[in-house]
Image (cartoon, helix red, strand yellow):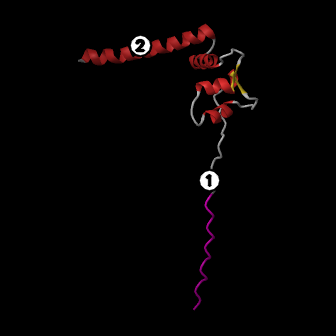
Amino acid sequence: MKKLLFVLPIAVALVGVSFQMDANAQVKKTGKPAMVQKCEKNFEAMDANKDGSISKEEFMAKHKGANAEKLFEAKDANGDGSISKEEFCAKNAVKKTTKTKTKTAAPKAEPKEEAAPKTE
């Protein structure tokens, strides 16, 4: 039992180091993190005609549903009718497309009037 308690943390640490080394190897191979590579791969899969941008038709072919058009408009940050790789992979490319409710502060309470000192 003592051996297991000793060996288990070491094994967990080695697995963690192994995963980090794999991620670092990916970055060294391509110069890009794995998430960026995945995003670019998804972009290329969606760009059916390989012109370097995703048209609304290409986007709608992959995205079904009521929100697909809103999602396209949100990703198309510059509003030119197509999504570039930069727009597609940008972390904050999705802009708000619906009206947001703004919270208004509660009205401030009127200051209480001080009671007049009692005079006798």
Quadrant the N terminus occupies: top left
- Residue 85 bears which disc, if any? none
Q: Which residue is mark 2?
A: 14
- State the image quarter where residue 40 is shown: top right
Query: In this view of the protein, which residue sits in the foreground, 74 or 64?
Result: 64
Q: Estimate the spatial distance between the alpha carbons at disc 1 and disc 2, rounded to whole Å.
A: 49 Å
Q: Which residue is mark 1?
A: 103
Point out residue 55 in the picture as x, y percentages from the top left corner: 70, 24
Q: Mainly helix, strand or loop, the magenta region?
A: loop
Name the element at disc 1.
Answer: loop
Point out residue 6 in the picture as x, y percentages from the top left corner: 31, 16
Q: Determine whether 101 is above or below 47 in the image.
A: below
98 displayed left or right of 14: right
**Mark 1 touching mark 2, by CB under 8 A?**
no
Give the magenta range. 105-120
Name the element at disc 2.
Answer: helix
Q: Residue furthest bottom?
A: 120
Q: Reply yes or no: does residue 63 show up in magenta.
A: no
Quadrant the C terminus occupies: bottom right
Point out residue 5 in the picture as x, y percentages from the top left corner: 29, 19
Q: Residues within 10 Å of mark 1 (few under 14, many from 20)?
A: few
- State the image quarter where residue 58 is shown: top right
Q: Give the residue type that dot 1 points to.
A: Lys
Q: Determine whether 67 is above or below 114 in the image.
A: above
Point out residue 57 in the picture as x, y percentages from the top left corner: 67, 25
Q: Earlier in the sequence, mark 1 or mark 2?
A: 2
Which circle, 1 or 2, is nearer the viewer? 1
104 displayed left or right of 11: right
